[in-house]
Amino acid sequence: MKIKILYAHEKVKKPVLSTVILKTNVPLNILEATVTPSKGEMVVDVPASGRQLEMVIEALKAEGVEVKELGPTIEVVKDKCVLCGACVSPCPTGAITLTMEKLEIDEQLCVRCKACVVACPFKALSMATMS
């Protein structure tokens, strides 16, 4: 599951992720991060589900940060996608598969690197908004 974490200025200097990892024993992988002295925003992959995922989210909230669960990472505009396969090879994690009928993106494997978005000659792929 990918989540977005929003830090207020008073939490930026605290080791929030380290604390949560130690409390929950769940490794967290930072996929994107923008941190300034006044605020922080991260997209984190949490390799957990069910009660374990709930524990991570609760621990993050207990540390005083805002948590949002993210939906799909890559949006495919079906009218623009011609199933050419240009997006498949650049994907470093093998998250994209192509059949004769459709393009599929494995959300668990996608690391939001944007290689597929850049490679698409038809601009059929875009990053989903993280609001």
Image (cartoon, helix red, strand yellow):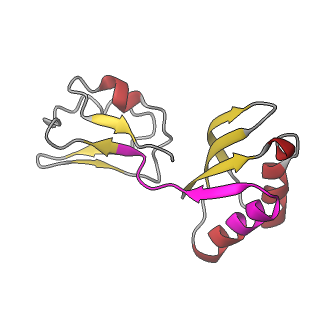
Is 55 rendered above or below residue 97? below
Along the line of sight, which residue is nearer the eye, 69 or 107?
A: 69
Along the line of sight, which residue is nearer the eye, 110 or 5?
A: 5
Across and down, in percent, residue 32 comes to 60, 37
Across and down, in percent, residue 24 comes to 77, 66
Judge left or right: residue 112 versus residue 61: left
* Picture quadrant of residue 96: top left
Residue at x-position 73% and y-position 68%: 58
Across and down, in percent, residue 66 comes to 69, 56
Residue at x-position 40% and y-position 52%: 72
Judge left or right: residue 119 versus residue 53: left
Residue at x-position 29% and y-position 31%: 87
Q: Is residue 25 visible?
A: no
Along the line of sight, which residue is nearer the eye, 104 or 72?
A: 72
Q: Which residues are magenta?
A: 56-74
Is 126 rendered above or below residue 68? above
Let me know if residue 112 is in the magenta part. no
* Picture quadrant of residue 34: top right
Let me know if residue 72 is in the magenta part. yes
Judge left or right: residue 123 versus residue 41: left
Residue at x-position 65% and y-position 36%: 33
